[in-house]
Image (tube, grey):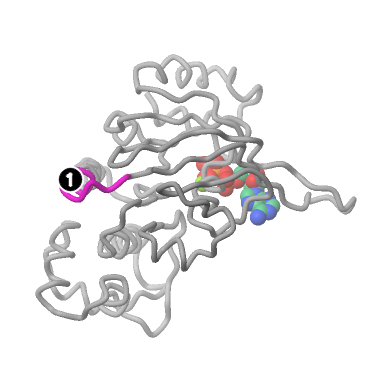
Amino acid sequence: MIEIKDLRFSAPADDEGGGVQDIVKGMDYTFEEGKFYGITGPNGSGKTTLAKLIMGINQPTGGTIRFQGEDISRLPITDRANMGIAYSFQNAARFKGLTFRDLLAIAAGTDDEDKLMEIIARVGICSMDFLDKPVDAKLSGGEIKKIELATTIARNPKVAIYDEPDTGIDLWTIGPMVDLLKKEQRDYKTTTLVVSHNRSFLEAADAILLIKDGRIGYSGDFEGAVPILTDLSVCGFTDSCEGVADVRCYR
Ligand SMILES: Nc1ncnc2c1ncn2[C@@H]1O[C@H](COP(=O)(O)OP(=O)(O)OP(=O)(O)O)[C@@H](O)[C@H]1O
Ligand SMILES: [Mg+2]
């Protein structure tokens, strides 16, 4: 479905020397159609960068990405979106002057009230009033994440990439959110990639990818990932204590 080969991304280093820093350092993996993937790993390890490379928000500096057999490595975001890849940002954008209804209508390709109602019901928003909320700075962090989720789902994508969908979401909503994404996967055969530090998402995944320092440190089932995630708690995984904040969520 999505095949990445020796995928690499480098960016200018922060220093003044004009050097580069390697952020994704050669990843190989095949995401299979209709499966649910949990992508995890310490802060700064390259998870968002990998997700953005697949969507085309970042362009790779090496390697290839194939989608349904076609090389999409150099295609712009819009082409990849038209092919059926959708992306939900870790930090969702806010738009002054637009309402949730506007965004949803753009994503769904229709402003039909019944269709919009069906979509917001799918993400567990029960009030039509919510549709007329402006998507501006006044929205709470959790509300904006739900809107982001709804607009991704509204596209009925073949591949849905969610970058930390649970950030800012109340604890009671995380379980239903996992159920929702699993249901979308089942009902629409959506290949689902969820970047998360949350155990609920990881347990629900068909396969886990553990990103470590720009590489895939582990891929396989959740049970196999647990010892490595546990190791993180003693900082062995990163050789520093940067992973500690993540690890608290795994317990
Ligand atoms: N375009 C860029 N230019 C320079 N540095 C970048 C760029 N994109 C990412 N980085 C750096 O690459 C590293 C990995 O970033 P990334 O956002 O992929 O991490 P992450 O694994 O998603 O972390 P988190 O769990 O905190 O979300 C970070 O140190 C980040 O500052
Ligand atoms: Mg990230």
Which of the 4 image quadrants contains residue 63? top right
Which of the 4 image quadrants contains residue 138? bottom left
Of residues 109 and 195, the one drawn nearer to the viewer in this rendering: 109
Q: Is residue 126 above or below residue 34?
A: below
- The residue that label 1 is drawn on is 183
User: Which contiguous range is marked in magenta?
Assistant: 183-191
Q: Residue 156's spot in the image, x, y percent? A: 26, 60
The residue located at (52%, 54%) in the rendering is 72
Of residues 56 and 136, the one drawn nearer to the viewer in this rendering: 56
Of residues 28 and 49, the one drawn nearer to the viewer in this rendering: 28
57 left or right, relative to 202: right
**Label 1: which secondary element:** helix
**Dividing the image into 4 quarters, which one contains the C terminus?**
top left
Q: Main secondary structure of the magenta part?
A: helix
120 left or right, relative to 209: left
8 left or right, relative to 36: right
Magenta includes 190? yes
- Count neighbours of disc 1 (C-alpha within 10 A) and say few if under 14, some if 14 to 19, many if 20 or more: some
